[in-house]
């Protein structure tokens, strides 16, 4: 986004410019909010490719870390990666899973969000790379996350969805994804195994969110399998 003039080292970026760039790249839009939203409201927005961004900056006495999101966290951490189609799709998948979720499942999805889009690592070039916004917006956490001193686990939604985490200190555990497509595949398989009465899917051709009763979705899957192998 720096190459396109959306982000600059000399002036504060404007959310409308970032939103216009992302919408053209992957269909995501940025909506400003005054403060923290509930997990349900925030994740529901991701299902429709809406990212709610803060409009304030962290205090100058704490430049390296803030326990709540600010413009550095959102614009440096979250928004640039949303220009990547695979990352945008993975982000939306977490949002889609939140639609129609009960409080128990929503709590698990909030933990998955934390261990991926906030503090996730991925494999690249034989090493670990940072992609979580909570790490990218904290110079100290970047060093810590790649130091080799933390616990590193392969990304597994079943494990990450029930693992507690600290908010006010560096993370003791990171989940490492092979890539965004693989992480999305594992996430969707885990979601399909949950006790949800409806299945939510995104149609990229019509750009619509569609819901199916679980029984209907299973029938559609069987029909698709028969059409492929017939």
Image: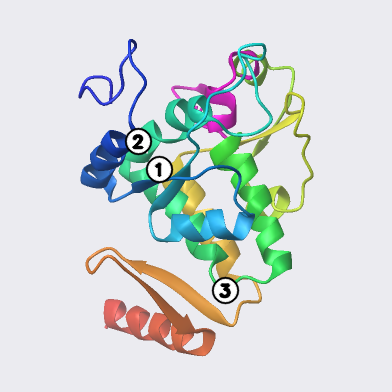
Task: In the rendered structure, find residue 230 and report the number of the disc placed on it.
Answer: none
Residue 48 percent across, percent down from the top left: 39, 60
Check residue 150 for magenta coloring: no
Residue behind mark 2 = 15
Do we see residue 24 in this rendering? yes
- Could you tell whether 206 is left or right of 48 in the image? left
Which numbered mark, 3 or 2, is in the foreground of this view? 2
Q: Earlier in the sequence, mark 2 or mark 1?
A: 2
Residue behind mark 3 = 100
Corner quadrant of residue 2: top left
Residue behind mark 1 = 87
As measured in the structure, the alpha-carbon distance from the residue carrying label 3 to the one carrying label 2 is 29 Å
SS at circle 3: loop
Residue 167 percent across, percent down from the top left: 75, 34
Looking at the rendering, the stretch of residues picked out in magenta corresponds to 120-141
Quadrant, the N terminus:
top left
Q: Earlier in the sequence, mark 3 or mark 2?
A: 2
Q: Residue at position x 40%, y 52% from top?
A: 50
């Amino acid at each position: 986004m720096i190459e396109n003039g959306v982000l600059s080292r000399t002036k504060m970026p404007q959310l409308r410019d970032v939103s216009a760039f992302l919408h053209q790249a992957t269909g995501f839009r940025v909506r400003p909010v005054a403060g923290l939203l509930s997990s349900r409201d925030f994740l529901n927005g991701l299902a429709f490719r809406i990212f709610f961004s803060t409009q304030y900056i962290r205090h100058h006495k704490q430049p390296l870390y803030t326990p709540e999101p600010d413009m550095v966290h959102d614009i440096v951490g979250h928004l640039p990666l949303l220009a990547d189609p695979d990352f945008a799709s993975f982000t939306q998948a977490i949002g889609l899973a939140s639609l129609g979720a009960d409080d128990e499942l929503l709590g698990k999805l909030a933990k998955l969000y934390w261990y991926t889009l906030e503090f996730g690592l991925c494999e690249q070039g034989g090493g670990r790379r940072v992609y979580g916004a909570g790490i990218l917006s904290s110079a100290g956490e970047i060093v810590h996350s790649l130091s080799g001193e933390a616990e590193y686990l392969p990304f597994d939604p079943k494990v990450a969805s029930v693992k507690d985490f600290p908010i006010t200190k560096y993370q003791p555990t990171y989940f490492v994804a092979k890539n965004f497509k693989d992480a999305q595949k594992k996430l969707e398989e885990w979601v399909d195994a949950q006790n949800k009465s409806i299945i939510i899917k995104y149609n990229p051709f019509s750009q619509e969110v569609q819901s199916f009763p679980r029984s209907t979705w299973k029938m559609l899957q069987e029909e698709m399998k028969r059409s492929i192998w017939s």
